[in-house]
Amino acid sequence: MLKKFHMLTAAAALGLAAFTNTAASQDQEWKVAFFASSAQNGFNQAVYEGIKNKAQELGNVETAIYDGQFDAAQQYSQIEDVLASGEFDGFIVVPNDTVGIAGVVEMVAETGKPLATALFPIGSDLSQLEPQVPGVTTTVAGPPADGARKQAEDVVEYCADKNPCNVVIIVGQRIFPFDNLRYEAYREVLDQHDNIEVVATGEGNYDPDKSLTAMQDILQANSNVDVVLTNADQHLIGVEIALEAAGYDVPEVYLSGGGAASVAVNAIREGRWDVTLAHFPVSMGEYALDAVVQALKGETPPSVINMDEVGPVPPLVNAKVLEEHPDFEGEWAQ
């Protein structure tokens, strides 16, 4: 009888320990740092909005944002310094240099702290969403080359009855690996068609004013533009102003943007723009923080969250898609 009592007591103790550990995990408070490629950029701000939304929902996570200023060296140093401080338990990054950042991500791996990358995978192969570098817990992104090919194939369809079909390409900065990848994906598709002529390439640096200047310069040298293909809706804001100033009837030019910002969604509904490659930054931030917290709790988060598959609308958003999804407004302003 005494032996049975001791067994029951031990079992009760084990149950209490398990309950205590679970409660401790639930009550644990964590700090997560978000390293934006640029804190002034609307897309990054929307990612951080998602991070804060999820933190508020969880109730036990404190967050902070760091401004990478579209500078790869700056962002690398920020992560290095924050890691050395020991102040934060987890990390989320929108990388400026998806290859060069690998060194500091491996430093994170040595500490065992989780890190989620958003918008782009980290590593030499941007088509591979599965983590390539030790230290990446979860990749929250869509394959960038796949999206660029979808955009270019859509342009090919538009240009089918035009010969020549004069196309302007505007990317952020060719020095960025992800922008160069998109540019090469555009050309891979467009260059297969003899009726399509890429008359100019500009860099908008994800800024309407810089895009306006770039498009003005392009229009001075090219009097007949049929299509503007770009990876960012911010670029099209400046492009539209430049086209209007040059005397173009804007709806007659095929405008393809990237991001599905609310400004693009409204412009497509109004018939001024034609299509945008959708990104969902608020959702992206929510998924990223959730993955980091899962890892902090000792759970196993998904290694990949493909935003092309979990987004609220199809990746390529045009007037037909918006008609089918009348409540979709976009997850960020611009």
Image: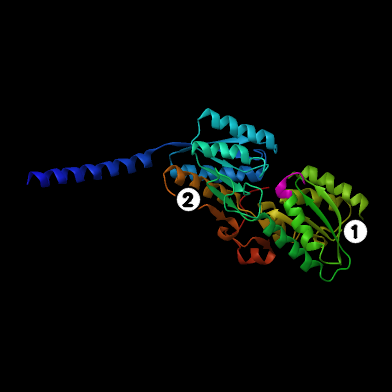
Residue range in magenta is: 174-179
Q: From the image, state whether disc 2 or disc 1 is nearer to you.
A: 2
Residue furthest to the bottom in view is 161
Residue 307 quadrant: bottom right
| Residue corresponding to mark 1 | 224
Colouring used for the render: rainbow
Q: Residue at x 37, y 39 (%)?
A: 27
Going from N to C along the chain, the mark reached first, 2 or 1, is 1
Q: Nearer the viewer, residue 18 or 51?
A: 18
Residue 37 quadrant: top right
Spot occupied by residue 54 in the image (x, y as percentages of width and height): 49, 45
Secondary structure beneath label 2: loop
Spot occupied by residue 109 in the image (x, y as percentages of width and height): 53, 40
| Residue corresponding to mark 2 | 301
Residue furthest to the left in view is 1
In the image, taking residue 11 as reference, residue 91 lies left or right, namely right
Is residue 145 depicted above or below 23 in this figure?
A: below
Residue 312 quadrant: bottom right
- The amino acid type found where label 1 is placed reads Asn
Q: Residue at x 72, y 47 (%)?
A: 177
Spatial CA span between label 2 and label 1: 51 Å
